[in-house]
Amino acid sequence: MKPKTRISIGTLLARLTLIAAGLSALVPVLWTFLNSFKNRVDIVSAVPKFFFSPTLDNYLYVLNREAVAAGLVNSIVVVGAAVLIGAVLGLPAAYALARYPLRWGNDIQFFVLSMRFLPPVAVAIPLMVIWLQLELYDSRTALIATYTLLTLSTVIWLAIPAFKAVPKEVEEAGRVDGYGPYAIFFRISLPIAARSLVGAIAFGFVLVWNEFLIALMLTTSEAKTLPIVASELSQLGRDVPWGILNASVILLSLPPLLMVGVLSGFLNAAFKRKREAA
């Protein structure tokens, strides 16, 4: 018979703490999801209702608004372009900082990280003046350039540790086989660090997809993103349309979740094919 394993009090408390932390993050999301299918009278009820007659009116109202469709297109174009440019420029820069030490390498890393310390308003006001002078205010081009600064700093900051974790022996073996610097980066270092790099890119996507203040200050009508449009739904009348707001929150959260799921599935499939080939 196998001896019974005893769980210490510390381990039990740690598990309970993790469960409580997970519930604290999950319960508000589930409650928002439920409220998105409720009528307003069920949401504002003094006693929370877990059993109710679901309705799709909240989602239909949001999806049938032209402003929502335009905001969705703007968000996809702006965020997709900013993340793509940030990854194309940020990953080679992170690899260079990780593999080729410079005299000011630490200063460069701190500068990149310090860009995330600045409050959004400190970035938005000077950029608003610049885009107004260039006649690019309230345009997708201005938002793409602005969000590229955010994704670039995020990707570099998160990708440097991923490239440092790649064994140098593997790269040296590639040099022995005749690989040049670019081949080592694309065929060796990039695939090995891919798991961590996907997380960095996904984090950058979520960061700019949910960004509100900069988009609010740099747009008025033509280039409004989905968070701006969603915030305007609270101004529909004297009484706050809670069901519509909850539905807009759920719809706003779907693209980042879908992107993370697609990237994770693609990455898992790639690693599975690699193991089968080996």
Image: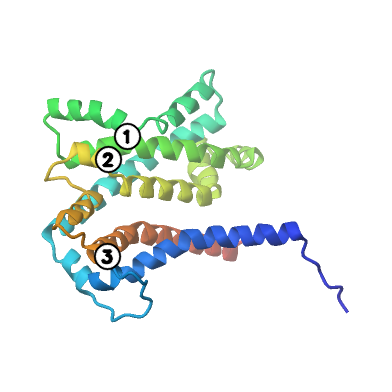
Q: Earlier in the sequence, mark 3 or mark 1?
A: 1
Q: Report the disc number at residue 120.
A: 1
Q: Is residue 275 left or right of residue 128?
A: right
The tally of labels here is: 3
Q: Is residue 232 left or right of residue 117?
A: left
Alpha carbons under labels 1 and 2: distance apart: 7 Å
Which residue lies at the image location 12% right of the left edge and 45% below the top edge?
222
Look at the picture and state if 200 lies above or below 24.
above
Check disc 2 and report the residue beneath it.
213
Q: Secondary structure at mark 1?
A: helix
Q: Quadrant of residue 152?
A: top left
Q: Is residue 224 left or right of residue 36?
A: left
Q: Position of residue 208 (x, y in %)?
A: 33, 45
Q: Residue furthest top?
A: 103
Amino acid residing under circle 1: Pro
Amino acid residing under circle 3: Ala
Which residue lies at the image location 28% right of the left edge and 73% below the top edge?
42
Q: Residues within 10 Å of mark 2 (few under 14, many from 20)?
A: some
Q: Quadrant of residue 12?
A: bottom right
Look at the picture and state if 237 lies above or below 210.
below
Whether residue 89 is visible to the viewer of this picture, yes or no, is: no
Alpha carbons under labels 3 and 1: distance apart: 27 Å
Alpha carbons under labels 3 and 2: distance apart: 21 Å
Q: Report the disc number at residue 262.
A: none
Badge 1 vs badge 2, beta-carbon distance below 8 Å: yes
Check disc 3 and report the residue beneath it.
247
Which residue lies at the image location 13% right of the left edge and 42% below the top edge?
220
- Quadrant where the N terminus sits is bottom right
